[in-house]
Amino acid sequence: MLSATAVPQAAVPTQRRDLRTLPNPPAVPASGLLGLLSEMRDDPIGLFSRAHREHGDVVSMRMFNQHIVTIANPEHWQHVLVSHREQYAKRTRGYEKLKLFLGDGLVTSEGAHWRRQRRIAQPAFNRKRIATFAASMGAASLDMRAIWQQSAARGEERDIAADMMKLTLRIAGETLFSLNISDEAAEVGAALGVVLHAFDRITTAPVPFPERWPTAANRKMRKAIATLNKVVEDIIAQRRAADARGEASQEDLLGALMAARDEDTGEAMDDKQLRDEVMTMLLAGHETTANALAWTLHLLSTHPEIAQAVVAEIEANVAGEVPQLSELCKLPLLDQVMNESMRLFPPVWIIGRRAEQDDEIGGFLIKKGTYVYMPAYVLHRHPDNWREPERFDPSRFSAERVAERKEQGVHRFAFLPFSGGQRKCIGDQFARMETALALATLLPAVQLTPLAGRPVVPDPQLTLRPLGGLPMRLSERT
């Protein structure tokens, strides 16, 4: 990965100067018409890792007829996400294509619309409300635990990644809508898979052909989007009808969003805004948490001594099969494992912005219109901030080690699993609680063993999935 002795960056100037006198970032050599686009499609993680290892923290790459810049220094991340955020918009091809699926929800919207939606949605994610969802999360995890125990008794193999998708989709349905949408899980999961594949295709195409063209791939994509829209829109329509009949509103996230009002204008969300926010929470939320769970279970399965220590901690501090919220604070090792898993395999592995005016990052010129990519996968493995960055070491998130890094001056943006600044994920506490409850319920029940000859490879699409799933053998824990 990155080398602490990589190509030195130009010194940051001490006083303001004409930005056009600044050098361009060092470029990754690229030949041919497509430049590095083929490598970007085939192995983006390898490309970004190599680029920063060989060329430093601010690097330029040519993709067909466009130059992008990628940054891996936490100070530079803070520059883009916080201190100069108004100069960097989400007007990248990726976010524009993401709107095909998510509309103008919190992930894709900007400016006044985003601020209004955030104000309306924020109360739905306060700690008190999130705590009310613990019972649903625990019950769903307990049902999955029972399924795993049956498989373990027979020594069966299961795709753990697929199981985590089913689990988090059920939790999303119950917490968003007070409905168990497990019956729709296969249909929704298949549609989501089509959407993710389509997203990867349309964001890396050298020529972005219109999605309305009647190609086979576009028809398949539109059908998948229609499937997802129908699930969400039908539920919203049913809730509107129940409200019209005077029935009590459900104590779920949809009810909270429907009841919320903009504190400045008193306005509520209309059906389109509701659809966009619910789609964002349903799909983005359950997808990222499922991946976080899958990667954590993978890491623990390949480090059985750490898994055993986590199980011992759970058994010593959790009275029942499902932990109470008050018991989660007694599981520091589990929390460290979750953080270390998201460090190594951040579910949202990359984010992007577009420079709205000329700027300077790390002493280099960032030209107006440049796409600036921030690969969290590389940031989280930067050797200047992490000792032995490739190693799975949950203890690096112990209170003592965290304090040690702070004393050493390691930047707080060196670890950003939920992004940072004002665009930090609104559901971060929800996701952390869900992940902890699921792991504390599932881990003591069975032993997970990786299959021999089946390497686990990251699949960096919109999120970071395990390529081809995560097959494991289940056995009873001894």
Image: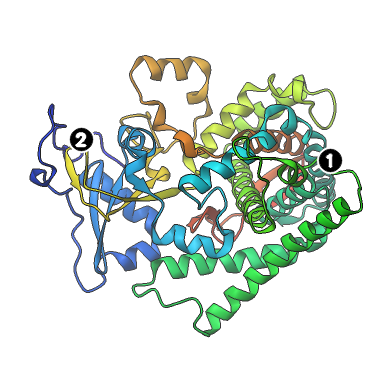
Residue sticking out furthest to the front: 265
The three-letter amino acid code for the residue at tag 1 is Ala
For mark 2, does the 10 Å Cα neighbourhood hold few (<14), some (14 to 19), or many (20 or more) residues? few
> Looking at this view, is 140 or 17 the one in front?
17
Q: Can residue 405 be seen in this view?
A: yes
Return the x and y of residue 470 as percentages of the image width and height. Answer: 62, 54
At mark 1, the secondary structure is helix
In the foreground, 9 or 83: 83
Q: Which residue is nearer to you in this view: 34 or 69?
A: 69
Residue 388 place in picture, x, y as percent: 38, 32
**Of tags 2 and 1, which is closer to the observer?**
1
Looking at the image, what colour scheme do you see? Answer: rainbow
The amino acid on which the numbered mark 2 sits, given as a three-letter code, is Thr
Q: Is mark 2 on a helix, strand or loop?
A: loop
Question: In the image, is 254 to the left or to the right of 94?
Answer: right
Specify the quadrant of the image occupied by residue 308: top right
At 52% from the left and 41% from the top, the residue drawn is 115
Residue 5 numbered tag: 2
Position of 210 with respect to 191 (left or right) is left
What residue is disc 1 on? 139
